[in-house]
Amino acid sequence: MSQYLSKEEIKQWRSSLEKITLEEYAKRLGKILEEEKQTSDIIDIVMKNEKRLYTTKENKNPKKQVLKLAKKAQDIQNTITSSIKEDSLSYIKSKLSCKKQLTQREDVVLEHFAKNKGKIVFAKDLAAILNLPTDYVYKYIKNLRAKINENILENATKGGYIFNLPNN
């Protein structure tokens, strides 16, 4: 006979009209509950065995704990996102040869083109990203074309620009 509760015994406990906890039921039968198994749930990975939110008896301010957890998750997401962005931009720059070093805004423009490779990108979209008037964006596109040796920016027939990365 097993020392742990079986599935059948747990089903009997659930169908029972008696209002007792599963732990009390297991004690009556002289058995114990099976220990927790290792999980791959994202909340457990992020929390790293910290106390759960549902143990509010011990937590005087659960809002603080939720905010702390949200901040921690946001930091992890920002770290992952920034490393992906850096990797994609460095990958693009490694296929491209530049005559001069790109400015920060030119890097942002190039990154946006890279994200939308093969799609039409309009100057108004770039203006919104750079928080500049649309007329100023044309200067960065012109400078980008002048600084990069390859011909990767083409004018789209319906307006805007298409980024075509060479296959090297």
Image (tube, grey):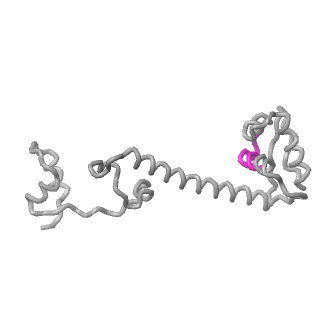
Residue 129 in the image: above or below residue 21: above
- The residue sitting at 47% across, 48% down in the picture is 70
Please tell me whether residue 119 belongs to the stretch shown in magenta: yes
159 displayed left or right of 50: right
Residue 2 in the image: above or below residue 115: below
x%, y% of residue 155?
86, 39
Residue 157 in the image: above or below residue 94: above
x%, y% of residue 90?
74, 59
Q: Residue furthest front?
A: 60
54 displayed left or right of 64: left
- The residue sitting at 80% across, 46% down in the picture is 163
Return the residue nearer the eye: 153 or 145: 145
Return the residue nearer the eye: 16 or 134: 134
Residue 80 in which image quadrant: bottom right
Q: Which residues are the magenta region? A: 110-121
Return the residue nearer the eye: 78 or 24: 78
Q: Which quadrant would the N terminus be assigned to in this image?
A: bottom left
51 displayed left or right of 158: left
